[in-house]
Amino acid sequence: MDHTDINPKTETQQENESSHHAPSDQASQSSSFRDRAELHTRLVRPRTFVRPSLPVDLLVSPVINSRDPCYMKADIFITSPFHIAGGSVAGKLNISTFQNADLQLGRVAIDLVGIEEYGFGHQKMFIALAAEFIDDDHPPPSTILRQGENSGPFWSIRKGEGAFPFDVNLPLDVGPGTFDSGTARIRYVIYGTILFKIGDKKFLVRCCRDVAVAPSLGEFRKTVTDFDREVKVFEERNFVPEGSLKLTANLSRPYWFSGGSAFVDVLVENETQFRIKTIRVRLVRPFLSRTLLRNICMVVGTFVLSRLH
């Protein structure tokens, strides 16, 4: 039950084998009271579940539009621009049909995914939450449903507009929060995918929006702070006569919270002929006893007082 906001993009194409993560045959924020009421008109909302396999086809075709003639359009609305781990992403997926042709709606789904981007167009998905709206027992909204006409898993729909409210539950550990460093970034994107058919031909419509997700409220407050410097460590070795090898690990901010995930982007500058087989990243937290820490504070305090006097 999830759809997102930001940069709404929308498209539709005839279904093909590469779109296997479209809803299966089995399975601008507004403050008006009217918009909020619409989110609650549909009392039965689909549960959030984890995709058994990552829907990587969403990265290939993030937006799918109806072409000529325009049969259907979709867009996503969300109630809040920021979301915290352990909470939920609420909103609605709006669909509009423009033709009175024999349109039959098969499945409607929402996917909320986390994407790691680095280098030149490299993308990797690390989390995929989803919700599916209609099946044999749950028809489309009455505003577009053609009464008394349905065949198997497909529902006959008419010209009009309908909304699918969603409320996607976020786990306590969603991974690293939304951020953008010098060489990599983390994005959370919500996709809405619709499967419909005209006659025997099946089509897909898909739209998407970016969503800001923070691992915790405290971390979100710190991550929006503009720090003067990044946390960066590097090591460089020279090999004669091959050249040099430099390894740099970078954290976009100095504050991270226990129980969450820290994202590190690693840059390798290899001017040698050696092949890099393994890169290990280790985060070490030094521990000081209270007694030792208190003694250190006393020494520092004494030093500061002596400098002031």
Image (cartoon, grey):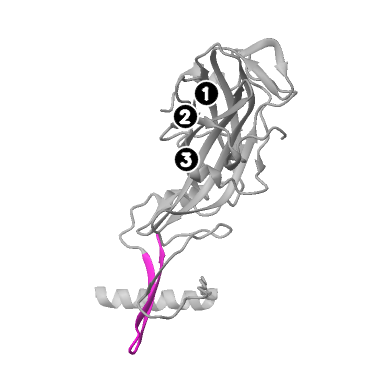
Which residues make up the magenta segment?
A: 231-252
- Which residue appears farthest toward the front when viewing the image? 200
Q: Is residue 278 left or right of residue 24?
A: left
Q: Earlier in the sequence, mark 2 or mark 1?
A: 2
Position of residue 245 measured from the top left corner of the image (x, y, whole percent): 37, 79
Nearer mark to the viewer, of 3 and 1: 1
Residue 65 — which label?
2
Q: Which of the pair 204/54 is nearer the observer?
A: 204
Is label 1 in a helix, a strand or a loop? strand
Q: Is residue 68 left or right of residue 303?
A: right
Three-letter amino acid code of the residue under disc 3? Val
Image quadrant containing the C terminus: bottom left
Q: Which of the pair 67/47 is nearer the observer?
A: 67
Res. 305 image quadrant: bottom left
Main secondary structure found in the magenta portion: strand
Is 250 rendered above or below residue 211?
A: below
Q: Which residue is mark 3?
A: 211
CA neighbours of label 1 inside 10 A, class few (<14), some (14 to 19), many (20+):
some
Is label 2 in a helix, a strand or a loop? loop
Q: Which residue is mark 1?
A: 94
Position of residue 185 measured from the top left corner of the image (x, y, whole percent): 42, 53
Is label 3 in a helix, a strand or a loop? strand
